[in-house]
């Protein structure tokens, strides 16, 4: 079977597949909520490390000169976009059925839609991996054996914003969870952070649930001992995310959590116009030189088939690295 053009298969035209991708329900992944998309038109990003500052403006006489505030130098960071692409070959048997109406054609169309959905999901997971690495380690380090490597450091202050709890929270009888969180929250607030939230997985959350001081505090007042909302109120933060989503590594042999065991992340999301960060989206040739998710196709003659490619270019950026505390608690 010779394939002359993808136009012989209307179901495989990129514009049709783009509509399929756009119609897919958003997966239940947290990263894009914490660092939302920010469309951009470059594939090498520059961003300033921001500091709101806490210095008072001062008073002057009624007709006096304004108080001179010296400009505070800000670090400018730069990093290339990460390029996420995944592809799948639709074989001759599927393509043959797409040529004719009827039950087999409908089944083939379903297989095409499922292929696009699977590829888009894998792109979502890679994007989530990038965001969660930025938030849970303050850096991204990616390397394939004998292949591509990529890294970026967001400058989270190691001496103050990457503490180790003492005692560790796994020592539930002696750990001072409330004291630790209040100290870390104060550190973020002193740097101008607002809308502070916590992030951990269920293993780390269990240390909070079983902490002796917290259990004693809530002994007569608790309604649902597993409700994170209660503990967010106790800890004085806007929300506590208990996040257990998993991903499988590239070779398919290892499954891991996006948020590692024994880590508790406290972060200030900020307000509109001054957020913690975002996911800067880069443009793509395959998306008409615009940022965002894209789909394209190309043919293979022997063996006959059509490759479907789904991708998205971009990079998590953090504007306020001193708004994050990445704590080792177990």
Image (cartoon, grey):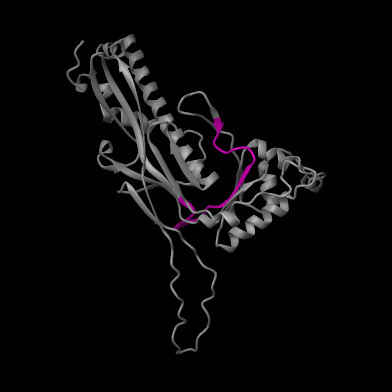
User: Is 234 placed above or below 301 here?
Assistant: below
Residue ID at (39%, 21%): 114
Provide residue 277's location: percent of width, then percent of height: 46, 51
Q: Of 137 and 114, which appears nearest the observer?
A: 137
**How many numbered discs, if any?**
0
Q: Work out whether residue 26 can be spotted.
A: no
Q: 70 left or right of 166?
A: left
User: Is 315 placed above or below 297 here?
Assistant: below
| Magenta span includes 301 | no
Q: Of 129 and 101, which appears nearest the observer?
A: 129
Provide residue 86's location: percent of width, then percent of height: 36, 29
Q: 48 left or right of 171?
A: left
Residue ID at (44%, 32%): 25
Question: Given the current orientation, which residue lies at the most extreme left position?
Answer: 4
Could you tell me which quadrant the C terminus lies in? Answer: top right
Q: Work out whether residue 299 can be spotted.
A: yes
Provide residue 59's location: percent of width, then percent of height: 52, 83
Q: 300 left or right of 61?
A: left
Could you tell me which quadrant the N terminus lies in? Answer: top left
Q: Of 114 and 58, which appears nearest the observer?
A: 58
Provide residue 165's location: percent of width, then percent of height: 69, 49
Q: Quadrant of residue 145?
A: top left
Which stretch did the figure color magenta? 256-277
């Amino acid at each position: 079977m010779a394939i002359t053009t993808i136009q012989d298969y209307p179901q495989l035209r990129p514009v049709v597949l783009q509509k399929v991708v756009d119609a897919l329900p958003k997966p239940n992944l947290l990263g894009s909520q914490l660092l939302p998309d920010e469309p951009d038109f470059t594939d090498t990003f520059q961003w300033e490390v921001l500091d709101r500052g806490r210095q008072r403006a001062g008073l002057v006489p009624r007709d006096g000169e304004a108080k001179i505030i010296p400009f505070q130098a800000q670090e400018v960071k730069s990093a290339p976009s990460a390029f996420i692409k995944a592809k799948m070959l639709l074989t001759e048997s599927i393509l043959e059925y797409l040529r004719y109406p009827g039950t087999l054609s409908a089944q083939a169309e379903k297989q095409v839609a499922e292929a696009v959905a699977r590829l888009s999901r894998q792109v979502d997971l890679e994007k989530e991996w990038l965001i969660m690495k930025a938030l849970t380690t303050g850096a991204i380090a990616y390397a394939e054996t004998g292949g591509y490597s990529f890294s970026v450091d967001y400058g989270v202050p190691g001496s103050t914003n990457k503490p180790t709890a003492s005692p560790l929270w796994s020592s539930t009888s002696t750990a001072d969870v409330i004291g630790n969180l209040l100290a870390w929250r104060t550190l973020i607030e002193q740097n101008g952070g607002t809308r502070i939230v916590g992030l951990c997985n269920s293993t780390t959350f269990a240390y909070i649930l079983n902490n002796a001081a917290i259990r004693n505090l809530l002994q007569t007042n608790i309604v649902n001992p597993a409700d994170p909302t209660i503990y967010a109120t106790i800890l004085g933060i806007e929300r506590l995310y208990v996040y257990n989503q998993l991903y499988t590594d590239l070779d398919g042999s290892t499954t891991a959590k996006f948020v590692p065991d024994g880590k508790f992340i406290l972060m200030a999301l900020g307000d509109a116009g001054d957020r913690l960060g975002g996911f800067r989206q880069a443009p793509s040739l395959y998306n008409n030189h615009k940022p965002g998710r894209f789909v394209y196709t190309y043919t293979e003659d022997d063996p006959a088939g059509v490759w479907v490619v789904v991708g998205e270019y971009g990079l998590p950026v953090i504007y306020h690295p001193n708004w994050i505390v990445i704590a080792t608690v177990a």
